[in-house]
Image (tube, rainbow, N blue to C red):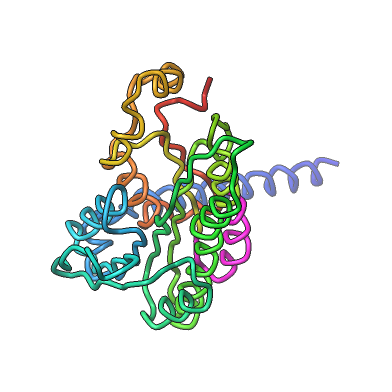
Amino acid sequence: MISFMRKNSVHAFLQHKVAGQMVKGLTRSMASKVPQKMEDYFKDKKIIVTGSCAGMGEKITERLLDLGAFVYAVVEKKEGAAKALPNTKQIFCDVSKWEDTYKTMYDIGPVHGLVNNAGVAVIEPFFEVTENGWDKTLNVNARALVRISQAVAKNMINAGIRGSIVNISSTISTRAIPDHTTYCASKGAVNQITRTMAIELGKCGIRTNSVNPTVVLTRMGKIAWSDPEKSEPIMKRIPLGRFAETDDIANAVIFMLSDYSTMVNGTSLVVDGGFLAG
């Protein structure tokens, strides 16, 4: 009996010692692995940004360029498009066209990241929803996102790139507001598409997440939400007491694209000042 107890004690001691060494080794390993700077990660990376000519897309493109990335700036048409910036290439594409969109995006070749920012908002009360408004909104905000991502992910997989895809959604994908039936529906679809992509593409090392802003004060946003009767009910629900700026959204997108979020997949990063918390 004594011999048996001694063996157990020795065994327990050795287990404890080995476990302790493993924990110490793991702790040292984790402590010594310092994440690289954002500037180091994005240098010479290739990123596609759709809807890049204005608002959030313009700011995201600007920030990526500042960090040393090369940006494929996707805009709808040549007419009226701003001149291409250094380290960018303009890609002209009507993303509502199924086959043309796939070919255009696939022909870009392998990239390290994709920001699905292109979107439209057709504001129609429920009883006034039109076929055109429904089709346009769902085609651009949800269907095009799928088609673009198919082409880009295919290139990533073929090139062995463990890339990141960021889809721009909205807080009203989960909390509806009046007069936005089609927009709410389209952004709810974006959330579910994002989760499905995360499950299927994650096996190939590609992460897919969404960024879900509240009202963003782009040039158009300032006009659309300038009426206090419309804006105050939402503003009152935001504990931080303000709407989002384009920099707030760009910060979230940059994080999701970078190696600072390598274990983040299939989630919605809400940028709303606490709107959904209450």
- Is 202 magenta? The answer is yes
Residue 216 point in image, percent of width and height: 34, 37
- Is 198 magenta? The answer is yes
User: Is 57 on the left or on the right of 193, as rendered?
Assistant: left
Of residue 4 and residue 43, the one placed in the foreground of this image is 43
Q: Residue at x 39, y 23 (%)?
A: 231
Image quadrant in which you'd find residue 69 = bottom left
Q: Is residue 18 visible?
A: no
Of residue 215 and residue 204, the one placed in the foreground of this image is 215
**Magenta stretch?**
191-207
Residue 55 point in image, percent of width and height: 28, 48
Residue 162 point in image, percent of width and height: 45, 69
Image quadrant in which you'd find residue 179 = top right
Picture layout, residue 53 above or below residue 221 = below
Residue 56 point in image, percent of width and height: 31, 48
Q: Residue at x 30, y 34 (%)?
A: 223
